[in-house]
Image (cartoon, rainbow, N blue to C red):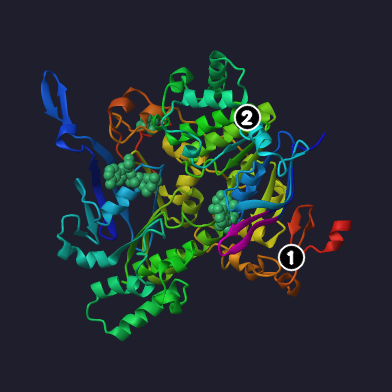
Amino acid sequence: MAKLLEVRDLVIRFGLRTGEVTATSGVSFSLDRGERLGLVGESGAGKSVTGFSIINLISKPGYIASGEVNFNGENLARVSPERMRQIRGNRISMIFQDPMMTLNPVLTIGTQMTEVLHRHRPELSREQARDIALDKLRKVHIPSPEKRLEQYPHEFSGGMRQRIIIAIALLTDPELIIADEPTTALDVTIQAEIMDLLMELCEKDGMGLILITHDLAVVSQVTQNIAVMYAGRIVEKGPTSRVIAQPQHPYTRGLIAALPQSSRHGERLNQIPGMMPTLKDMPPGCAFNPRCPHVMEICHRQIPALRPGSNGNMAACHLYPEENAHE
Amino acid sequence: MSESLLSVRNLTRHFDISGGLLDQIRFSGGRFHRQKTLVRAVNNISFDILPGETFSVVGESGCGKSTLGRTIMGLYAPNAGEIHYRGDRIDNLDPRSLLPYRRKMQMVFQDPYASLNPRKTIRQTLEAPLRYHNPKLSNGEVQDRIEEVMLQVGSDPQWISRLPHEFSGGQRQRISIARALIVDPEFIVADEPISALDVSIQAQILNLMMDLQQQRGLAYLFVAHDLSVVEHISDRVGVMYLGTMCELAETAALFENPRHPYTRALMSAIPRLGGGPGGHVRLRGEVPTPINLPSGCVFHGRCPHANDRCRVEIPGLRRLDDGRQVACHGVEEGRI
Ligand SMILES: Nc1ncnc2c1ncn2[C@@H]1O[C@H](COP(=O)(O)OP(=O)(O)OP(=O)(O)O)[C@@H](O)[C@H]1O
Ligand SMILES: Nc1ncnc2c1ncn2[C@@H]1O[C@H](COP(=O)(O)OP(=O)(O)OP(=O)(O)O)[C@@H](O)[C@H]1O
Ligand code: SF4
Ligand SMILES: [Mg+2]
Ligand SMILES: [Mg+2]
């Protein structure tokens, strides 16, 4: 059976007035049914653009310049807008950081939920749609869901709103959920609840999850596999526990070493010098080379391909030469 | 408490959000009343900060951390309570008498984009507070101080003729810190100074803050929502819930063995790198609004250990044998 999702060599570009810029290059990853994948990296690394491109939601002037997004074997990068509408919000749902990107402030939760359902399943009666909505609200542990259906978004707290978003995402029993920083704006206690919930749903219903976040600790708890992005490329990927325990790419190593947990109380943190380049001033070769403690001559002229590192993680770094690939 | 740098005693700060007179009129018991709507952001909080220490305040959004910091800085007038700086009472001073203290106490804000004036060059931003507090400095001395402080925060002194938009978030935060440092303070309130920054930049700014503390003996009141950062840099930590301090302890004691039921829930929810999922203490319900504070313990509606006493009697911060302070009847009674 085909993978649930297989993204291959994705290149996303923005046609700006000041010229074209490439936001992501050569992004490849795949996801099995029921798998949870974390997409991590710092601000501007290309996480959201990658997530949006899967369901063709990149905002103008962005576009998929090349590459494939195979969902159950169908290349979504090439399907008609009509076909995309059948898949988006139906078989693939998206959860955003800001619940108000999904919720309409002037409609009740009930109305919004039935609207989504009718868009994808027009044959449903009002009662059937209501029952499904209630069922999903229960699934995300909203107390007294009957009453909640009649309420407006502003009557909910931030954590409740995010749970309602998840309930909406679940309405059509999607096979894949893309969650872009779903808890970044929330407190840790609420974040822990939402993450538990997402995991529970994936485990019970075999849903795939792409969790986009800059928080390595969250990803390490929720996902089985991880892809680390830097300056528009995946620089490391592999099983989450191994990437965290034995990071191969110098950037991943630096990122983990920079966390307070990696230093003794009160001591200086292991900072990575400098900052991520912007799209307009990408250095030639490896984009991490200005910050890398292991930089070599080749790093300045050749972009490293994603290859197996010494422990089987895939890493895009000249420290792991071609030979490893043929072991 | 004479060795304290800062002493906060029973500090209370409310916000009146009643609106106009008409909004305030209520009819009850056959009569009209004028009723105020108050946000009780900070209630009866007391603590001390020692010279050179990092005291952090944690708690969920809206619990009053920023209000506490701003009230201490004199940006908000307290409704009750006292603030002492090196033994001098400062909360009731007029602006002129406050001036020498303002120089000793500086603030760094969360948003490095909003806290720098976009039309002022870095030089202007740094020069204004320096000249204000040191009117006798010559131009040459001002220039020297600016260059010195830029170097200290790891920024190139050549940048001072640029405008804020030419800098990244991390660089701007360095300049905000330079602005606080240039008047040679002893105490800095840092309200979420790294929250808007990327992980790899956060480490740079935290290192800078720790280095400066060592070099200058600075004391910090540090507010952050990233508890692993707080655990790393703090000497002591106060945990707030709904405007109230519910536990105050040395960092290791607090993180290794939290005592207040709210602190326990909060600590258990911290995502740990490589730690397993789940296992956190689930709280029932939601944080109530600070407009109508719950009776008794502000946490009783969500607390798994609440009893009748908790519902009526406000628990005060009590010192335990290990030196920490906890505001909880259950802990006092030995139930928790
Ligand atoms: N509409 C747009 N026009 C031009 N450039 C854009 C646009 N949207 C995104 N970009 C650029 O694409 C790059 C990747 O952005 P993206 O939003 O995917 O980052 P991210 O990893 O999600 O970051 P964050 O953590 O801040 O959300 C960035 O350099 C960004 O500036
Ligand atoms: N100027 C103001 N006018 C009215 N209410 C205010 C004002 N400032 C704060 N509040 C209210 O006081 C309470 C405490 O707010 P505060 O900003 O101190 O919380 P916080 O702990 O800093 O939260 P966060 O973590 O979100 O920054 C909140 O209910 C807030 O809405
Ligand atoms: S005082 Fe009572 S309600 Fe408050 S935290 Fe302690 S046990 Fe819970
Ligand atoms: Mg993003
Ligand atoms: Mg605040």
Residue under the image location 36 percent in, 82 percent down: B144
What residue is disc 2 on? A201
**To which chain does the residue with label 1 belong?**
A
Q: Based on the displayed image, in which of its 4 quarters is residue A80 positioned?
A: top right
Along the viewing direction, whichever of A67 and B183 lies nearer the viewer: A67
Task: Mark 2 or mark 1: name the one nearer the start of the chain.
Answer: 2
Residue A201 picture location, percent across and down:
63, 29
Residue B304 lies, with reference to residue A73, above or below; the image says above
Instruction: Write down the residue under mark 1.
Output: A303
Q: Which kind of residue does numbered mark 2 sit on? A: Leu
Q: Residue at x 23, y 54 (%)?
A: B83
* Local crowd size for mark 2, using a 10 Å CA cut-off: few (<14), some (14–19), many (≥20): some
Q: Amino acid at mark 1?
A: Ile
Q: Quadrant of the N terminus of chain B?
A: bottom left
- Foreground of the two, A221 or B31: B31
Label the magenta part by its dominant secondary structure.
strand
Instruction: Please give the range of residues in magenta.
Output: A12-25
Is B171 above or below relative to B57? below
Q: Chain of mark 2?
A: A
Residue B103: give its label.
none
**Occupied quadrant, residue B106:** bottom left
Q: Is residue A160 left or right of residue A166?
A: left
Q: Foreground mark, 2 or 1?
A: 1
- In the rendered image, the quadrant that contains the C terminus of chain B is top left
CA separation in Å, label 2 and label 1: 39 Å
Reply yes or no: does residue A78 show up in magenta: no
Residue at figure coordinates x 29%, y 30% from the top left? B296
Q: Secondary structure at mark 2?
A: helix
Q: Is residue A17 magenta?
A: yes
